[in-house]
Amino acid sequence: MPEAERQRRQKLNSSGREERLNHAEVERQRRAKLNQQFNALRAVVPNISKKDKVSLLGDAIAHITDMQKKIRTWKMREQD
Amino acid sequence: MPEAERQRRQKLNSSGREERLNHAEVERQRRAKLNQQFNALRAVVPNISKKDKVSLLGDAIAHITDMQKKIRTWKMREQD
DNA sequence: TCAGACACGTGACCC
DNA sequence: TGGGTCACGTGTCTG
């Protein structure tokens, strides 16, 4: 188990504090970017039923498949 | 939810412990549902560039706007 | 080794 | 008033 050893070393590391603070900060930025994408998604998807993320993704998926269906029928018409 | 389980929870509830456990469980289910939607999104969006969630949302948004553009031009043609 | 990505439990908040 | 949702810091895995 290298994990136990790894943890021990990290604890003894004098810069361990900074590492953890930085880790928290990096994670915060990652979340911010993720939420930014969620908002961008809200902007391009019509008929948002609710505000929560799960519903948002659900609506987005529905909208995508709906458009794909539309496009498919148009392409078939075009072929005639 | 079985009655026995319900009673058990109610009993432990008085100690305040089960509520926290339940809270953790509920949150876990919420995350599971969210990831389920992410996977569903992966299934309907073509040309996934990378595997991470931020990129996935980015690709999904790009695909949506692209389709919207296509549909708009087709509709204009149809009007003629 | 190390940076990036994800899951977890917990506190706060809001109908 | 409590059940549902979010943001946070932290632990863990991986390439």
Image: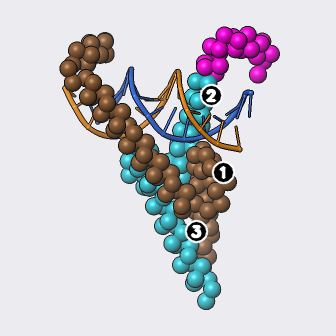
Chain colours: A brown, B cyan, C orange, D blue
- Residue B3: x and y in percent read 80, 16
Q: Residue at x 44, y 54 (%)?
A: B58
Q: Where A52 falls versus A12 (above or below)?
A: below
The three-letter amino acid code for the residue at tag 1 is Lys
Can you identify the residue that label 2 sits on? B26
Quarter of the picture containing the N terminus of chain B is: top right
Instruction: Give the mark, 1 or 3, whose residue is nearer the N terminus.
Output: 1
Residue extent of the magenta highlight: B1-22
Q: Which residue is mark 3?
A: A71
Q: SS class of the residue under badge 2?
A: helix
* Residues at marks 1 and 3 on the same chain: yes
Residue A24 forms part of the magenta stretch = no
Tell me, for residue A20, which label it has, or none: none
Q: Position of residue D15 (x, y in %)?
A: 29, 36
- Is residue B7 a member of the stretch shown in magenta? yes
Residue at the spot of label 1? A50
Q: Nearer the viewer, mark 3 or mark 2?
A: 2
Residue under the point 59% across and 37% down: B33
